[in-house]
Image (cartoon, helix red, strand yellow):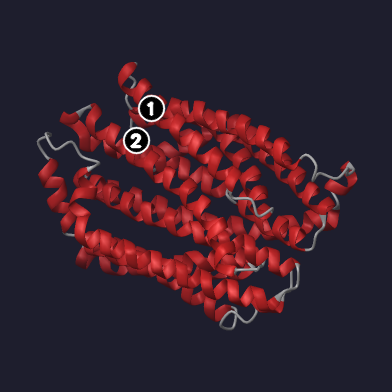
Amino acid sequence: MKMNREIIRLAIPNIISNITVPLMGIVSTAIAGHYNSEHSAATIGALAIGVSIFNFIYWNCAFVRMGTSGLTAQAFGAENRAECTRMLLRAIVIAAVLGVAVLLLQYPLGEASLWAMNGNELVADYFYMRIWAVPAGILLFALNGWFTGMQNAIIPMIVAVTVNVIHIICSFAFAFGLDMGIVGVAQASVVAQWCGVVLATMLLFAKFRHTFVKVTISEVFDRTAFTRFFAVNGDIMIRTFCIVIVYTFFTAISARMDEQILAVNTLLMQLFTLFSYMSDGFAYAAEALTGRFTGAKDATSLRKCVRLCIGWSVGIAIVFVGAYLGWWRELLGIFVDANQANASQLIDLAGKYIGWVIAIPLACSIPFLLDGVMVGATLTRVMRNAMLLSTVAFFALFYGLQPIIGNNALWLAFTSYMVLRGIFQYLMTHRLEDVYLLKS
């Protein structure tokens, strides 16, 4: 097997899938910036708060994808078709239960989120429209996690591209054609996500119907299997909750600084998000291949896979550093209407903090990749503990330095939080040697 070829086979479709996500964010932010140019900062801020609320919900449900991916990849590597089938059914059941729960609890979730994020009426309208997309989004987590575990990155790519194209088209149509503004962006998400579920289901049966093995309900809900599933997912939930807390705090504290800082930090985070989704393509490849080689008990291939994936991730980071150094003004200009009164002011203010965004790709490349390795190896306790320590460090740095350096403290804490995630995971696995023990 040519390892680089396998990595690229899995990474490229994931990169294409992932890059459509920030493109959707770019379009949404651009719509907010152009819809009401006289109050663009306020509209961008409202969108940022609304998106952060849904990031909180989605990220706390992301364990469905990650847990499904690692365990399915190990079953695939062990050539256990029955367990692959059972994993699909377990993931779908859990996703459906979570989706229904979110809809039933939408009012208390919405009111608590609006209070915590200091959201206004526009944010509320956005929330109560987009909440109907959440069950579909969680189902897509389950399906995409299973596809990744089965070493298939093409179907998630097709679904992601389709969902985001539909979202972009509908966003413009609803926001400008129906004059709905960012509420139209929320409605576009509902349409797009449910279209994605239909498409993913069709492709699932078209590609894998001959792979499925007849299983019983008792096998699907086997206590030992479910205990392991929830142990892995419990660690991932705690880890993801820490990420959500940090990202949500980032937006919330920006909103409490002032409207201009919130708008600038939102714009700069779009550049970070663009890199993170590109880098995650190789993290997903590492996730799938690590699980596969762990299930197959192939330590030699596993070592080679991890080493090469790290190299690819660092290479991508260097490319982004160069791009941000040379064209950050042009990239930020995509999000702001050049004709609006405060456009140049926003770009100039962003220039005071752009150094953090330029440095972040190098800070994040290895931590993102190691997350994929830990998921594939189901060393989720390591990932959880590393995240907990990094989150404590984030808040300590911010509150210790914010009175002295203001918004720079937020970016310093965020960058340090990313770096520490990688350092802690590396040390907690005894320089990755625990990964190669193949204890799936």
**Quadrant, the C terminus:** bottom right
Q: Residue at x 33, y 64 (%)?
A: 319
- Residue 112 higher or lower than 37, as above or below: below
139, 113: nearer the viewer: 139
User: What amino acid is at disc 2?
Assistant: Ser
- Residue 302 higher or lower than 147, as above or below: below
150, 28: nearer the viewer: 150
User: How busy is the neighbourhood of tag 2: few (under 14 within 10 Å), some, or many (20 plus)?
Assistant: many
* Residues at discs 2 and 1 in contact (Cβ within 8 Å): yes
Camera sees residue 270: yes
User: Earlier along the polypeptide chain: callout 2 or callout 1?
Assistant: 2
303, 431: nearer the viewer: 303
Residue highlighted by disc 2: 28
Camera sees residue 115: no
Determine whether, in the image, residue 2 is placed left or right of residue 325: right
Residue highlighted by disc 1: 171
List x then y, in percent, for residue 39: 19, 31
**Quadrant, the N terminus:** bottom right
Does dot 1 land on a helix, a strand or a loop? helix
List x then y, in percent, for residue 388: 52, 66
Q: Residue at x 62, y 54 (%)?
A: 66
User: How busy is the neighbourhood of tag 1: few (under 14 within 10 Å), some, or many (20 plus)?
Assistant: many
Q: In which quarter of the image is residue 354?
A: bottom left
User: What amino acid is at disc 1?
Assistant: Ser
List x then y, in percent, for residue 289: 63, 64
Does dot 2 land on a helix, a strand or a loop? helix
